[in-house]
Amino acid sequence: MTLAEQQQHYRQRIDGYLGALIDGLPALAPNLKAAMKHGLLLGGKRVRPFLVYSTGTMLGLDEPRLDPMAAAVECIHAYSLIHDDLPAMDDDKLRRGQPTVHVAFDEATAILAGDALQALAFEELAKCQVASIEAFKALLVLFSQAAGYQGMVSGQAMDMAATGQTLSLAALEQVHAHKTGALIRASVLMPTLMAGSAPEHVEALATFSEKLGLAFQVQDDILDVTANTETLGKTQGKDQRDHKATYPALLGLNQAQTKAQTLVDEALSCLASLPYNSEHLAALARYVITRER
């Protein structure tokens, strides 16, 4: 199966699962439910569910067992985008080629939709089947840290604080290792807890995911310079206009592209040490820096 076919398979699988999940919620607040669905199911690359499914199946887990885990990471990702797009933060009007949630609905509903999706993520995580209570605790800690203060949320705070500043390369990497990388890392490592993987394999996958997360962000920064709004599905050039700290701004476009390639090469070398067929993960790593949106 090609990467494109695998991506389509996992996208259809997780979209079907998430659609049924939202549709199955009681009609307590229909407008809120519609806003949740808008933020969760209106397109997207589904990179994080892809990582959950590809890592898990590589380790011998079946797809139905991985569904709640994939749903949990995508719910967290969707909530973060809904809140990031708000006027109080990035003030974006367009996401995945469609109006952002606060534009399609209103700001209060967007805040509540994000809140509800965050809670739904932990409800899904509770469905994950692991071998022991200790493994479940480790899963919960990993996921909570990736989504919260020690991961994505602090990354967003650091990114906002860095607006208009010139950061060192190390400082910029710290921002994006948290903002983007933490949830990508969790998407790769959570299946290892379910599978009971050997420590040396977990270590290799951890390093792979960290390199991949940074490469993903470097390419995002590059696309803000080189792509157009129609292709991106979000406002092109906004990072520059908002004086955001980015890799092209710090390194220049050519050096940023070299940095992305180096990160992917390092990620691929981590996979080479594993006694598994990791071709789907390798193909995704290569895709991350060749994608156009």
Image (tube, helix red, strand yellow):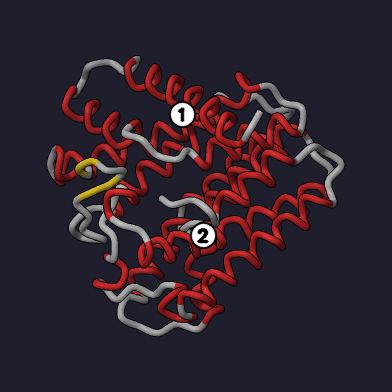
| Secondary structure under the numbered disc 2 in the rendered image | loop
Percent of width and height locating residue 150 = 51, 59
In screen coordinates, is 91 left or right of 57?
Answer: left
In screen coordinates, is 39 left or right of 4?
Answer: left
Residue type for callout 2: Gln
Q: Residue at x 31, y 68 (%)?
A: 239
Density class for disc 2 (Cα within 10 Å; few <14, some 14-19, many ≥20) is some
Which of 138 and 97 lies nearest the eye of the viewer? 97
Which mark, residue 123? 1
Which of 11 and 161 lies nearest the eye of the viewer? 11
Which mark, residue 45? none
Density class for disc 1 (Cα within 10 Å; few <14, some 14-19, many ≥20) is some
Residue under label 2, please give it.
150
Percent of width and height locating residue 210 = 63, 58
Query: Measured along the vertical axis of the image, is residue 50 above or below residue 85?
Result: above
Percent of width and height locating residue 31 = 16, 27
Is residue 236 visible in the rendered image? The answer is yes
Residue type for callout 1: Glu
Residue 132 quadrant: top right
Q: Residue at x 21, y 58 (%)?
A: 91
Instruction: Give the quarter of the figure containing the N terminus.
Output: top right
| Secondary structure under the numbered disc 1 in the rendered image | helix
Mark 2 vs mark 1, CA separation in Å: 21 Å
Residue 36 quadrant: top left
